[in-house]
Amino acid sequence: MHDARVLVVDDSAAMRALFCDVLEQSKNIRVIGTAANAAEAREQIAELQPNVVTLDVEMPGMSGIEFLEEIMNGGNPLPVVMLSSLTQSGTETSLKAFELGAVECFPKPLKATPEQFAKTVGKLGKIVLAAANSNVRDKPRPKAARGEGEAGDDGGYQSNGMIAAFSTSMGGVDALTEVLGQYPKACPPTVIILQTEPMLAEMFIAKADKDCRCTVVAATDGAELKPGTVHIAYDPARHVIVEPGTPAKVRMVERDPVGGFRPSATLLFGSLSRGNMPAIGAVLTGMGEDGAKGLKLLQAAGCRTLAQDRNTATVPQAPAAAVEAGAASAELGLAELAADILTNCAAAT
């Protein structure tokens, strides 16, 4: 893992100072420059060659979203962490930023003292360091839309009842958009852990439910796992597990974080393993090692286990941990991973 060389772009001098102070206190991160607008940032990028940019959404002249598009469509795209307010319009902008190729969108407090601000953005250092070591694509991924006769249409697809379970964090909105875009209407019963800001997760779920052929909902306690529905868990206060039964049920449980994560993918995968439920598990793009131990348990129970290809994952830490633990039966790109899940979860014809 190499160090992060950061350019901080924000039209507010106070915000620039605050972000610089927080980042410079983080290990393996060096702020090499600041800019107040896109024109200054363009010059700084050419001169200083940062390996990650933090970019404010709202700036005078060219907006952050417009400048992000310029960065990603240029000849040398950079990892970008967008900074946006936790409002509905800010969250909508964050989803647009993911579509354009942003590595992560970080909530920018609307009102906070310097002490509160520093506490709120304490995790920003980890995000920026992960972004500096991420895989960046040079153009947005096409988004699948619901429609008859298109690729991924049902084609008579029937689920065999096997549960699909996977986890993701940084880069997860983009990854899930591609995977769920391939899901048919009668998709396998699926439960997903998405580590992101709750407001962003809620808006993503609403958008995915509209765009995808299958039904996409927020995971709730007692929900039945049936074909045709994807349950996404994101509540940082509760874990998600699966309770055996006919059908199996989602359970939301309050307990301490596991390995620093809540909800924990390791706990989710472990519940499937302990319940001897037919399942297929996958770890997608994300930070940290959550899911690796649980995926190993699932594999030991005879289930198929997958990891997103480290070379294509936006942030390869989580899938790399699963592969290095020997927990993944296969390491696949997103299109191949989605196809593998659908094939293994299809009813025999």
Image: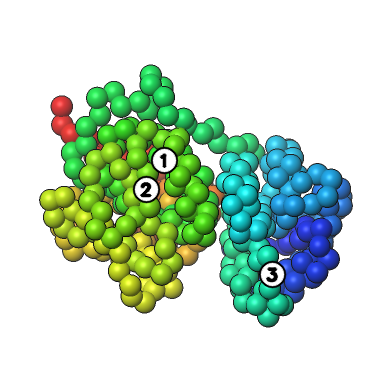
Residue 29 falls in which quadrant of the image? bottom right
Residue 242 falls in which quadrant of the image? bottom left
Mark 1 touches mark 2? (CB < 8 Å): yes
Residue 175 appears anywhere in the view: no
At horizontal 47% and vertical 52% (from top left) the residue drawn is: 202
Disc 3 marks which amino acid?
Lys
Image height check: is 85 above or below 72? Answer: below
Residue 49, x across and y down, in percent: 78, 54
Q: How far apart are marks 1 and 3 (CA)?
A: 32 Å
Image check: 172 left or right of 47?
A: left
Residue 74, x across and y down, in percent: 73, 38
Residue 251 falls in which quadrant of the image? bottom left
Disc 2 marks which amino acid?
Val
Element type where label 1 sits in the image: helix
Image height check: is 34 above or below 259? Answer: above
Name the residue beneath numbered marker 2: 217
Name the residue beneath numbered marker 1: 209
At horizontal 58% and vertical 41% (from top left) the residue drawn is: 99
Residue 288 appears anywhere in the view: yes
Label 1 or label 2, whichever comes before in sequence order: 1
Disc 1 marks which amino acid?
Asp
Is 109 or 289 nearer to us in this picture?
A: 109
Element type where label 2 sits in the image: strand
What is the quadrant of the N terminus in the image?
bottom right
What is the quadrant of the C terminus in the image?
top left
Name the residue beneath numbered marker 3: 111
Q: How crowded is mark 2: few (under 14 residues within 10 Å), some or many (20 or more)?
A: some
Mark 1 touches mark 3? (CB < 8 Å): no
Q: How far apart are marks 1 and 2 (CA)?
A: 7 Å
